[in-house]
Amino acid sequence: MGTPDFAVPSLETLHNHGYPISAVVTAPDKPRGRGQQVSPTPIRQFASRAGLPVLQPESLKDPTFVERLKSLRPDIIVVVAFRILPPEVFTVPTLGSFNLHASLLPKYRGAAPINWAIMKGETETGVTTFMLREKVDTGGILLQERVPISPEDDAGTMHDNLAVVGARVVLDTVRLIEQGRAVQTPQDDSQATPAPKLFREDCRINWDRPATEIHNRVRGLSPSPTAFSTHRGRVLKICKTQVLGSHARGSPGEVMISPQALYVSTRDRMLSVLELQQEGKKRMSIEEFLRGYRISSAERLE
């Protein structure tokens, strides 16, 4: 069970290793992309190429869907980047249902673990497989693998890295369950941290924060949904930054402009904006941006 690109390596790995997949469950087709054309989910696209049967229920509690699931008599349900499963679904398999989560649980429970780990300045994250139970992201841990976060990483590079690592961990987890050697380790709820769904206000930059904190927020929201600020009422998406050693030379949000650079004052240091995007335009380097956009030193980003 899965929907986005993150889930594809796990499905592909299980399929390539010969595990009989009785069904692939994914979200219904919906309008996607700039043209809003109705298109299948990445998981359905792979399943169709591999000749695997696909189920796309509107509701996971639909009695017709639940009965169809029971008729398949699955040994295991593997969940990667999907919806919250109700008990009538995750209790169907004889050997249980497990989920792949993109963090080192119990840290970063929630919908956006990759983003929040980077936004919080972590230098390490990872993946966890755990058995499902009714309370989200709280089940017994089966396997974990740690993955470093380099200073150059953003949410996009970590997403791709963790999807590959996660597929390997999913395969190892299935093998342990198959062999009857899977052991669940209870999560320590006192160590839990949240990673809730991201909303627009989570993406707005507050320039009256330390430069490193702003830089990590930019990394954690790049390439999507992207941190942003405004200038004269226009939204500027800030895609890539660099923290400078020099102290801030103006009030927070005040800019310094040179022909090939845009620096912004923060609470403590200067932040160099390296890549950004205007609404309706492509992502571009700061040099490209300054050639076609009027902004002067001492103006402010809000």
Image (tube, rainbow, N blue to C red):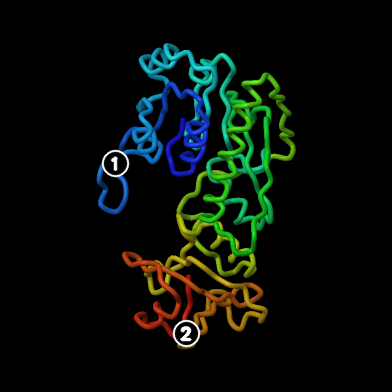
| Residue 279, horizontal then vertical, whole percent | 35, 65
The dot on residue 260 is 2
The dot on residue 39 is 1
Q: Earlier in the sequence, mark 1 or mark 2?
A: 1
| Nearest to the observer: residue 236 or residue 291 | 291
Element class at badge 2: loop
Element class at badge 1: strand
| Residue 26, horizontal then vertical, whole percent | 40, 31
Tell me if 35 is positioned left or right of 215 in this view: left
Task: Nearest to the eye among marks 1 and 2: give it.
Answer: 1
Q: Is residue 278 above or below residue 160?
A: below
Tell me if 132 is positioned left or right of 232 in this view: right
Q: Amino acid at mark 2?
A: Gln
| Nearest to the observer: residue 112 or residue 295 | 112
| Residue 122, horizontal then vertical, whole percent | 67, 55
Q: Quadrant of residue 31?
A: top left
View extreme (bottom): residue: 259
The residue under the point 36% across, 25% down is: 53
| Residue 154, horizontal then vertical, whole percent | 55, 59
Tell me if 225 is positioned left or right of 132 in this view: left
The residue under the point 62% across, 51% down is: 117
| Nearest to the observer: residue 196 or residue 55 | 55
Mark 2, other Cα within 10 Å: few <14 / some 14–19 / many ≥20: few
| Nearest to the observer: residue 278 or residue 8 | 8
Distance CA(mark 1)–CA(mark 2)? 41 Å
Q: Quadrant of residue 215?
A: bottom right
Q: Is residue 270 above or below residue 126?
A: below
Mark 1, other Cα within 10 Å: few <14 / some 14–19 / many ≥20: some
Q: Amino acid at mark 1?
A: Ser
Q: Is residue 53 above or below residue 108?
A: above
